Amino acid sequence: MVATQCIARVVYIPWVSACLDWWGGVGGVTLAIVALLQFAYHFPRLRYSQEARVVLIVSLIITGVLFTWMAWETLSVQPHYIYAMSPPRRDVAFAAPSVWQLYSFERFVFGFVRAGDESNFWISFRFFDAWQVIGNLWVLAVWVRKTVQFSVAPDNSALLRRVFTAFRHPQSSEARLSRAWVGMMLLSPIPVLASVLDSMNLLPPGMFALVYLLVLGVIMFTYVNYAPE
């Protein structure tokens, strides 16, 4: 995803840049969600094996639907601005292809949608947004379940009490690992918030990259700390 995003901002050819930007971003994140779901089920050892297979099949089907949808949009419509961080002039946003040589990479987010469809819910990038939320919440739920299962013996106490007990006093290394990854999943929205605040000029320039790298470093060290190798 990072490679395609970089190339998209180096190559000033509208169709090529928009394709790389759109497909690189959405494709990279979508495939990463599929992998992250399976990582949650398998690390440090496989739990809920049948559920993991079902989730893998469903996530691959969703990925196929999304990529097919995006391919249809790419081949059937022209690229134009999905939204702008600052309002563009309409005559510039939907101008002739020659104008696209002058677009600003820092101001606009590009994608492929039918002209006038910005208000229509059924376009691929909204489906992609929903899939991000569902996929990441599912990963979080798997880690929470593993934390509880590795810490608390089955009993008839209330679910919230069992969850609280497991997170307060994890009873095994696997429970501590799962609890750590719950923390990582809760930490991951912080770069998103930094990106939004950066785009609104409420943070100094470059803060998004700094926050992103810090969070990525914490995730990497957490994995190394709990990896069995």
Image (cartoon, rainbow, N blue to C red):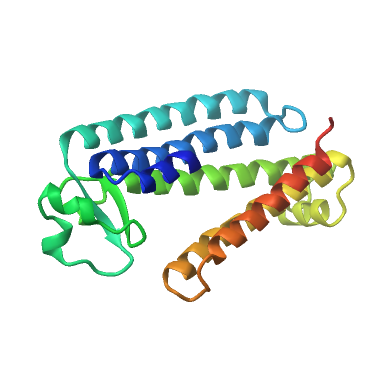
Residue at 13% in and 47% down: 97
Is residue 154 visible from the viewing direction of this image?
Answer: no
Q: Position of residue 111 (x, y in %)?
A: 29, 46
Camera-side residue: 180 or 200?
A: 200
Q: Position of residue 33 (x, y in %)?
A: 53, 38
- The quarter of the image holding the C terminus is top right
Q: Position of residue 59 (x, y in %)?
A: 48, 31
17 w.r.t. 69: above or below: below
Residue at 16% in and 67% down: 89
Give the quadrant of residue 77: top left
Camera-side residue: 50 or 157?
A: 50
Camera-side residue: 50 or 61?
A: 61
Residue at 36% in and 60% down: 106
Q: Residue furthest bottom?
A: 202
Is residue 107 visible from the viewing direction of this image?
Answer: yes
Camera-side residue: 211 or 60?
A: 211
Give the quadrant of residue 212: bottom right
158 w.r.t. 128: above or below: below
Q: Position of residue 185 (x, y in %)?
A: 64, 51
How many numbered marks does the figure carry?
Answer: 0
Residue at 79% in and 40% down: 224
